[in-house]
Amino acid sequence: MKRFALALMCLPGLAFAEGLTIEEPMVPLAPPGVMAHAAFMQITNTGDSPRQLVGVSSPDYAMAHIHQTSEQNGIATMSGVDLIEIAPGQTVAFAHGGLHIMLMHPKAALAEGDTVNLSLLFANGAVEPVTAKVMRQHRHGS
Ligand SMILES: [Cu+2]
């Protein structure tokens, strides 16, 4: 998302997001050579006005997008998400099989315990920095 990075630099008085709680940000450890990673977390709007999540960026990857996995006729497909509205008091979960942050082409190999830097961009121009931990995850499917 080069365009996004550029737009950020042009924003005067960049504001950090307030009234948001990010819990359990993590990137499941992927086998070496896998070029697509995912990031998961829970985002809670602890403020009193709705928030619109409109994008994500990461300096650690060539590309980062918000994706939604949905299953149709037993086949999982992913599509891009342009806007996620988070109502006051609402928690939006990014998790396996649903919303996730798609991370493409890591700039360096990641090991367990490493961290991935993410920035969540909101419609009001606020940016929420998130540090996700690379963790081993035992599960079947994805
Ligand atoms: Cu995806």
Image (tube, rainbow, N blue to C red):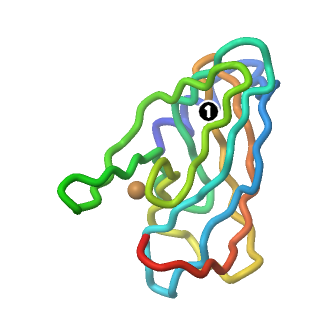
Residue that lies at the very extreme toward the front in this rendered image: 73
Pointer 1 residue: 121
Is the CB atom of the residue marked by disc 1 within 8 angstroms of ligand 1's nearest atom? no
How many tags in the picture?
A: 1
- Which residue is pictured at 29% across the width and 60% down the height? 76
Please state which of residues 91 and 116 is positioned toward the viewer in this rendering: 91
Apparent side of residue 127 relative to residue 142 in the rendered image (left or right) = right
SS state under label 1: strand
In the image, farthest residue toward the top: 49
Say above or below: 98 vs 19.
Answer: below
Q: Quadrant of the C terminus?
A: bottom left
Nearer the observer, 36 or 48: 48
Residue drawn at point x = 68 percent, y = 62 percent: 26
Residue 91 location (% of width, % of height): 67, 35
What percent of the width, then of the height, locates residue 43?
69, 39
Q: Position of residue 5 (x, y in %)?
A: 56, 39
Name the residue: 48% across, 47% down. Answer: 99
Dividing the picture into quadrants, the one containing residue 110 is: bottom right
Neighbour class for label 1 at 10 Å: few (<14), some, many (≥20)?
Answer: many
Q: Which quadrant of the figure shows ligand 1?
A: bottom left
Residue at point 47% right, 56% down? 102
Corner quadrant of residue 35 = bottom left
Compared to residue 91, the image places residue 97 above or below, namely below
Please identify the residue farthest to the bottom as the structure is shown. Answer: 32
Residue 37: percent from left, percent from top: 50, 67
Q: Amino acid at mark 1?
A: Leu
